[in-house]
Image (cartoon, rainbow, N blue to C red):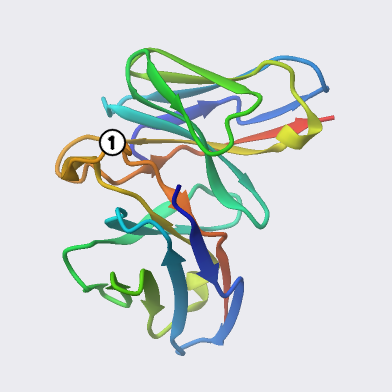
Amino acid sequence: GENVEQHPSTLSVQEGDSAVIKCTYSDSASNYFPWYKQELGKRPQLIIDIRSNVGEKKDQRIAVTLNKTAKHFSLHITETQPEDSAVYFCAASERWGAGGTSYGKLTFGQGTILTVHP
Amino acid sequence: DAGITQSPRHKVTETGTPVTLRCHQTENHRYMYWYRQDPGHGLRLIHYSYGVKDTDKGEVSDGYSVSRSKTEDFLLTLESATSSQTSVYFCAISGRGSRDNEQFFGPGTRLTVL
């Protein structure tokens, strides 16, 4: 099955700095890579996702890059703000629309606790 | 929040007792999932459903069973709860519209097994 490794486990930055979280995956059939943000005591919320037919996607201060050859993808947050402080999870799955039978099951990384200091 | 609820939100039970958690959705999503979240492990898939009465095991299914008798409801049962099943349980849904891979999560259920 799929295995997703996420680093670092904790990340501390100053407000305004950039933050980068990296994930590697093992299954070459995976082609959908979402990132979730989870605030304390809340549910995970999707913040950005990327599919294997593109190498980069941006949404305001957040970007995700994907290297299919190396099987790794990264989350980049620029101009960090204190409200970005949360736990971030990467995940991987095989889209069922691509002919697979994974039914969209996600395999998650272990999470990164991001703290942005004012 | 995508019309997904979980009940109960908190539960404390004793070892050996049966427990059923409910996930209810109003969005007509085809796929439903149960995950557990533990420190250092992220979220791990317990069971999932790809249609009414169609379910399958996930990564950590031992000690759990599920049922889905109608589209809206997905039940997770711990037949005989153990302390190792103390966790936060999240239900998720997906499979509707152009964003069919996107999973929406419920608010979670915090289960403590004493």
Residue A25: where, in percent of width, then height?
Answer: 42, 62
Residue A3, horizontal then vertical, whole percent = 48, 56
Query: Which residue occupies 58% across, 78% down?
Result: A11
Q: Is residue A42 left or right of residue B49?
A: right
In this view of the protein, which residue sits in the foreground, B59 or A36? Answer: B59
Label total for image: 1
Residue beneath the point at 43% across and 86% down = A18
Residue in front for this viewpoint, A55 or B97: A55
Rendered image quadrant of residue B24 = top left
Residue B17 in the figure: left or right of residue B88: right
Amino acid type at circle 1 is Thr
- Up the image or down, A103 lies above or below A31; here it is above
- Left or right: residue B107 versus residue B15 is left
Q: Residue at x 74, y 17 (%)?
A: B80
Please tell me whether residue B9 is drawn above or below residue A58 in the rendered image.
above
Residue A91 vs residue B28, the one in the foreground: A91
Can you name the residue that lies furthest to the top here?
B69
The chain letter for the residue carrying disc 1 is A
Quadrant housing the N terminus of chain B: top left
Is B12 placed above or below B106 here?
above
Q: Give percent across and percent down for residue B5.
A: 46, 29
Residue visible at 32% across and 78% down in the picture: A61
In this image, A7 relative to A34: left or right? right
The residue lying toward the viewer, choosing from B82 and A43, is B82
> Can you identify the residue that label 1 sits on?
A101
Q: Is residue A118 visible?
A: no
Tell me, yes or no, if residue A5 can be seen here.
Answer: yes
Residue B114 percent coordinates (x, y): 85, 29
